Amino acid sequence: MFAVLKTGGKQYKVASGDVLRVEKLAAKAGDKVQFNEILMVGSTVGTPTVEGAGVQAEVIDQIKGEKTINFVKRRRKHGSQRTKGHRQQLTLVRIAEILEKGADKSGVMAAVSGAGIAHVTGANGAPTSKKAAAAAERASTPKADKPKAAPKAKAEPKAAAGADDLKKLSGVGPALEKKLHEAGVTTFAQIAAWTEADVAAMDEKLSFKGRIEREGWIAQAVELAKG
């Protein structure tokens, strides 16, 4: 009996004992695999595949195909050919058994093209990934819930005790207020009491460049200190 199977995008007519090269399968030498895309078994033609049919095979070895020869045609010149270094990865298998029915319950690893994960044929005929099965088993195992950490409150800048809001002065923002605090100036009363020498020293120390007189901080501080 013969069968026509499909793997790696190609179709093969096989019989028991045949040795053929197919697109690389995710299996090792000595593994038993099963082709489940069967287009024809004996006189039974699939629509497009034969339900319940399968072809079992033994993996002999993982091999590489021959180097390919590329032909290049050039206008007004002689054509040329060169050997390309790529070698297609193939799997050598020996056909062991052709099943007309019952292949969906055989439990033999499905032949999967490429370097993917090996699959096992389930009871309903669908390939079941070993990795997916392990993930499902882990998911079904209850895990102890970890207590969620409370969200951290956003830190707000702390004002010194008894300090005034110096940002009420014209041209003073958070950055300038921070500089004044670092210089020990925290109240309107302190600014209202500045002398010309204090203003000059503060201008030089904090690089205000005449901002104190230009913005009239002292006069503003006198009014603000009154409350």
Image (cartoon, rainbow, N blue to C red):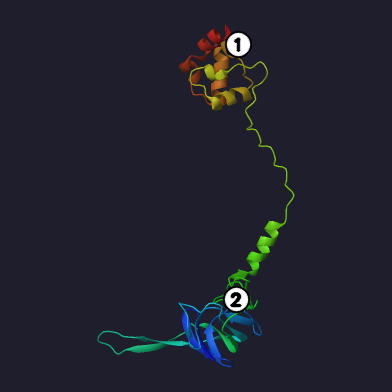
Q: Position of residue 210 (x, y in %)?
A: 48, 20
Vertical arrangement, residue 58 with respect to residue 175, above or below: below
Q: Position of residue 81 (x, y in %)?
A: 38, 89
Q: Residue 91: which quarter of the image? A: bottom right
Vertical arrangement, residue 139 with respect to residue 96, above or below: above
For the C terminus, the image quarter is top right
Q: Position of residue 118 (x, y in %)?
A: 62, 74
Mark number displayed over residue 189? 1
CA distance separating discs 1 and 2: 91 Å
Q: Across the whole image, how many numbered discs are drawn on residues?
A: 2
Q: Residue furthest left?
A: 76
Quick one: SS at disc 2? helix
Mark number displayed over residue 104? 2
Circle 1: is it few (<14), some (14-19), or many (20+) Cα within 10 Å? some
Q: Nearer the viewer, residue 48 or 189?
A: 48
Left or right for 54, reference 138:
left
Seen at 66% across and 62% down, the residue is 135
Q: Amino acid at mark 1?
A: Ala
Vertical arrangement, residue 145 with respect to residue 217, above or below: below
Seen at 46% across and 17% down, the residue is 214
Q: Residue furthest top?
A: 226
